[in-house]
Amino acid sequence: MRRFAFYIAFFCSTLFSRCGNPEKTEDTEEQIALNLANNIDSNSINLLKEYDYAVRGSYDGWLKLSADTTLYFCIYKKNGDITELGVFNPLNFADDFASSFNFDTSRYNQFTFFQYNDTIIKILRIDKKDQEHPSDTLVATKQLFTKKNPFIRFSELTAMKDKLNFTGSSYRSDIGEFIVFWIHPYKLIYLPDTTKMNPHWKRRYWLDEFAKGKKIKEHWSLVKMY
């Protein structure tokens, strides 16, 4: 799946879900941006080079990347003692999180796992007609995901997002070595090295976009979207 088409739906949900909050001020958004720039660490930056983020309704949405290609998409939500993890493009997902579960992609588009106390208690399959097929189960998460626990990875990603307080992120390795964060109604551009930018995009857009924003720190520019 190419990333461009996916982003149209992916980031619209982020932008519109955060519109029109009258309590926020420019100072608040700038403070959030400065806090992010001052406190993000190299581990978080490396994670955001693997996964883009956007709000998906009441869920956190994480998009696994490879250059300009989407490998898989996950939605994550913790609701009390129950944690949900929904998976799209599960065959690529299983490359990262080896599983004994049979992802039958001939019949289903989405698979959602419900975890309670390190145990999967329900699995919801959604077929290609958007019909839901729930099934109760009782299997240890480590038995279903035999090498690496995806609930831990997406918990870490979501905790990092909450700490840094952004509403969307995008890493564009096909254009250059930089990350865009959404802090509505701004985008915060982190551009550490212009020499790694694709010359086509460097001339036409991103350097101008970076220059028109407010420099809040070296390599960081806060740009109002509208």
Image (cartoon, grey):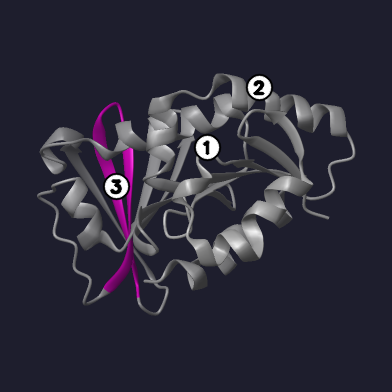
- Tell me how far mark 1 sits from mark 3, CA to CA: 44 Å
> Amino acid type of disc 1?
Pro
- Nearer the viewer's eye, disc 1 or disc 3? 1
Q: Residues within 10 Å of mark 3 (few under 14, many from 20)?
A: some
For the question of whether residue 61 can be seen, the reply is no
Q: Quadrant of the N terminus?
A: bottom left
Q: What residue is disc 1 on?
A: 192
**Looking at numbered disc 3 in the image, what kind of residue is underneath it?**
Lys
Residue corresponding to mark 2: 35
Q: Tell me residue 85's x, y (percent).
A: 37, 46
Dot 1, crowdedness within 10 Å: few (<14), some or many (≥20)?
Answer: some
Please tell me which residue lies in front, 92 or 195.
195
Q: Which mark is residue 156?
A: none
- Mark 2, other Cα within 10 Å: few <14 / some 14–19 / many ≥20: some
Q: Which residues are magenta?
A: 108-127
Element type where label 3 sits in the image: strand
Q: Residue at x 69, y 25 (%)?
A: 34
Residue at 29% x, 26% y: name it. Answer: 117
The image shows residue 135 at horizontal and vertical percentages of 27, 55
Looking at the image, is mark 1 or mark 3 earlier in the sequence?
3
Q: What separation in Å lies between label 2 and label 1 (alpha carbons)? A: 17 Å
Q: Which mark is residue 122?
A: 3
Q: Does 184 lie within the magenta span?
A: no
